[in-house]
Amino acid sequence: MPSLWFVVPAVGRFHLTAICLRQLRRTCDQLERHGVHASAVVVADDENLDTARELGFGWVRRDNQFTSQKFNDGIQKACDVAVNPRPVDYVVPCGSDDWVDWRLFVDLPAADTMVGFQRMSFVREDGGEISESLVNYPGGCGIRIYPRQLFEPFGYRPADEHRQRGCDTSILYNLRAEWGYELQLHHPDSDPRQIVDWKSPTQQINSYDDVVQWRRNAQPDPFETLADIYPADALDEMRNYYHLALVPA
Amino acid sequence: MKYGVYEVICSLDYRGHSPGTRFVARLDSAAEARAIVRGNIRLVEEISSLMPAEHELPAGWADSTQTTAAPSGASTVERGK
């Protein structure tokens, strides 16, 4: 049974992050039922660590100065036998405002192959629109499946340490520099709703408008659009989050 | 695994880092030596671990009876550099 951890850097946005981590807990539980030993590690230095503990996830306490350092901390915690007696076989970086469908992680790649997903969905900051996107560059969006072996030459810290953004690009660049043509890159076909980025009114690296170049097929009701992929409990929680966020205090 | 804090001491960028700035990296020893000899960078400090002091495994992970099996294709990865 292969093992997999999601690596989740987080900062602030406690309500939204808690909803997304609870959904990630369901994702991990589904993976366990389908033959993948799955968990997550949250990297933060605030209330989000409490949520991680409550859900049984691992955690690393790190300030928010460099996002890439947080990814490296989580990846090292997952993969390095010096800090994890049962290092995982696969790592998936995941945003603290993302939902991912467990079905994407059942068919896992060979040790020389990175899997990147190019289709995903974004939900507008007010929760009133969802659109599909094709992120058509190598590696696709930041949700990627990395076999642990690929990170070994980097001491399991594959991103440049001092980056605020572009962490996924940094990892891919470094992997290619290290492995050259030995690194295989696979972009499986997937439904864009299997990866959802929930935009919030506060604190995010890219807004809904920032990703306009990839956007298409906008739909007015994200919760109806996602109903056959994600559980009703999770969708209800998220619907309430947007409702509360939009009601003036 | 050793890392270093380096300072860019020449008037040009070094690997995307501006003159006068410090950065943390794990450099190949030959590349590090060349850059130091050329006067591009200086080693400020060697670091043996970048992992923060406080971290915890997922609940029950260490006690799990699950073994990590080598994924299919693992044996095909060889260093060909």
Image (tube, rainbow, N blue to C red):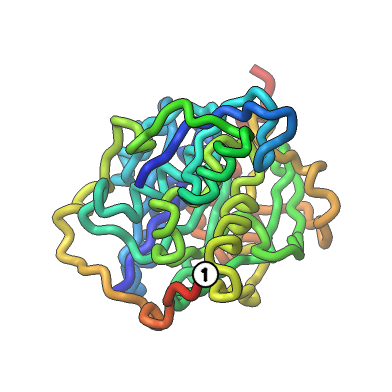
**In the rendered image, which residue does mark 1 sit on?**
A104
Left or right: residue A111 versus residue A161 is left
> Percent x, y for residue A163?
60, 37
Q: Nearer the viewer, residue B55 or A194?
A: B55
> Percent x, y for residue A119?
69, 65
Q: In the rendered image of this protein, does residue A111 appear above or below residue A159?
A: below
- For the question of whether residue A234 can be seen, the reply is no
- For the question of whether residue A53 can be seen, the reply is yes
The residue that appears at 50% across and 51% down in the rendered structure is: B30
The residue that appears at 50% across and 64% down in the rendered structure is: A145
Q: In the rendered image of this protein, does residue A96 appear above or below residue A101?
A: above
State the image quarter where residue A30 is shown.
Answer: bottom left
Q: Nearer the viewer, residue A92 or B6?
A: B6
The residue that appears at 42% across and 32% down in the rendered structure is: A48
Q: Secondary structure at mark 1?
A: helix
The numbered mark 1 sits on a residue in which chain? A
State the image quarter where residue B57 is shown.
Answer: top left
Left or right: residue A222 versus residue A152 is right
The residue that appears at 50% across and 35% down in the rendered structure is: B24
Amino acid of disc 1: Leu
Q: Nearer the viewer, residue A202 or A171?
A: A171
